[in-house]
């Protein structure tokens, strides 16, 4: 797939409609993002793709009018390592449905939680995820749908999606790029929480995927609590030990561009905080 890479700065936004406005439509959410001075929003289909094509077109118009960049989060109920063929097919279908509706509102990326290891060897799981992703990409190509498919770096030991797994998939499967959740990676490793470690991650992405990956990054961030098995839950940034100021400094110093989606419970408040820090540097 050929895509035009536009060099631009990092945009900040929320995972879903900003929090005091939950009852409003996606179009209203876009207006709120604009009023808040933010630049992007992730449309949440985590419980299912529940948007009609005409609505998606209206959402796309609202976003274009306000210059807000959109992405989407696919349903949680996906496992590209499911044992039953029916569950695998349904998992692929959920990603495809999300990609179709995202293309209709001109969103650039679909983020998804790829798989669970279950009892399998990680290399076997990798092979299963890769082959299923290839099938999805082939199907989307035949439909002329061009959106980035972004497996997310996951926070729990039971979840497929280490940094290396996500980068390897991005290197090997056309149309796949990382969704880098820095909070998840910190929760999973207990590390990855300092300027130097963040820079090391960015360097790894550059060497594995090229500079263009850093020019079109998709980042998730929140505060987070965690234990021996990784992520417990998302927190507001100020309630957690995550060194977000150091991350923002690393992103700025390394001239990372793309979108940063805030997934803290307070959504827009932390999104604005991160944007403020970024702009002051
Ligand atoms: Zn996610």
Image (cartoon, rainbow, N blue to C red):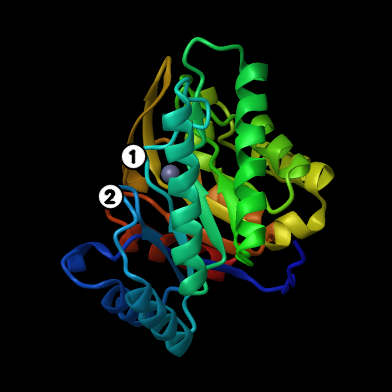
Q: Which mark is residue 265?
A: 2
Q: Residue at x 72, y 74 (%)?
A: 6
Could you tell me how far apart the alpha carbons at marks 2 and 1 are, in whole angstroms? 7 Å
Query: Whole-percent x and y of residue 86?
Result: 43, 31
- Where disc 2 sits, the SS reads loop
- For the question of whether residue 269 can be seen, the reply is yes
Q: Quadrant of the C terminus?
A: bottom right
Q: Is residue 90 above or below residue 103?
A: above
Q: Is residue 3 left or right of residue 37?
A: right
Q: Is residue 9 above or below residue 62?
A: above
Ligand 1 located in image quadrant: top left
Q: Quadrant of the N terminus?
A: bottom right
Pointers 2 and 1 in contact (C-beta within 8 Å) = yes
Q: Residue at x 43, y 73 (%)?
A: 38
Mark 2, Cα crowd under 10 Å, few <14 / some 14-19 / many 20+, is some
- For the question of whether residue 155 can be seen, the reply is no
Q: Residue furthest left?
A: 23
Question: Which residue, given by chain and number where applicable, does mark 1 sit on?
Answer: 234
Q: Residue at x 49, y 10 (%)?
A: 119
Q: Is residue 275 above or below residue 270?
A: below
Most foreground residue, 193 or 112? 112
Query: Whole-percent x and y of residue 225?
Result: 35, 31
Disc 2 residue lies near ligand 1 with CB under 8 A: no
Q: Please identify the quarter of the rendering in which residue 13 is found.
A: bottom left
Q: Reading the chain from its start, which is encountered first: label 2 or label 1? A: 1
Query: Whole-percent x and y of residue 63?
Result: 43, 80
Q: Residue at x 36, y 82 (%)?
A: 58
Q: Please identify the quarter of the rendering in which residue 213 is found.
A: bottom right
Query: Whole-percent x and y of residue 194?
Result: 60, 38
């Amino acid at each position: 797939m050929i895509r035009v890479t536009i060099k631009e700065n990092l945009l900040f936004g929320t995972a879903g409609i900003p929090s005091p406005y939950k009852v409003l439509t996606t179009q209203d959410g876009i207006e709120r993002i604009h009023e808040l001075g933010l630049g992007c929003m992730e449309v949440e289909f985590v419980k299912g793709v529940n948007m009609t094509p005409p609505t998606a077109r209206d959402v796309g118009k609202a976003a274009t009018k306000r210059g807000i960049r959109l992405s989407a989060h696919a349903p949680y109920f996906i496992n590209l390592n499911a044992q039953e063929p029916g569950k695998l097919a349904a998992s692929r279908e959920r990603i495809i449905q999300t990609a179709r509706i995202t293309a209709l509102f001109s969103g650039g990326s679909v983020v998804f939680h790829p798989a669970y290891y279950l009892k399998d060897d990680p290399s076997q799981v990798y092979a299963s995820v890769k082959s299923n992703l290839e099938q999805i990409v082939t199907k989307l190509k035949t439909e002329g749908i061009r959106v980035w498919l972004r497996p997310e770096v996951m926070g729990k030991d039971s979840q497929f999606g280490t940094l290396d797994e996500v980068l390897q998939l991005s290197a090997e499967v056309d149309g796949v790029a990382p969704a880098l959740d820095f909070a998840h990676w910190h929760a999973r490793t207990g590390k990855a929480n300092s300027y130097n470690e963040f820079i090391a991650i960015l360097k790894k992405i550059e060497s594995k995927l090229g500079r263009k990956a850093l020019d079109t990054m998709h980042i998730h961030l929140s505060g987070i609590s965690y234990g021996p098995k990784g992520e417990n839950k998302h927190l507001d940034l100020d309630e957690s030990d995550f060194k977000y100021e150091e991350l923002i400094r690393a992103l700025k110093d390394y001239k990372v561009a793309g979108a940063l989606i805030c997934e803290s419970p307070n959504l827009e408040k932390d999104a604005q905080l991160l944007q403020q820090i970024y702009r002051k540097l």
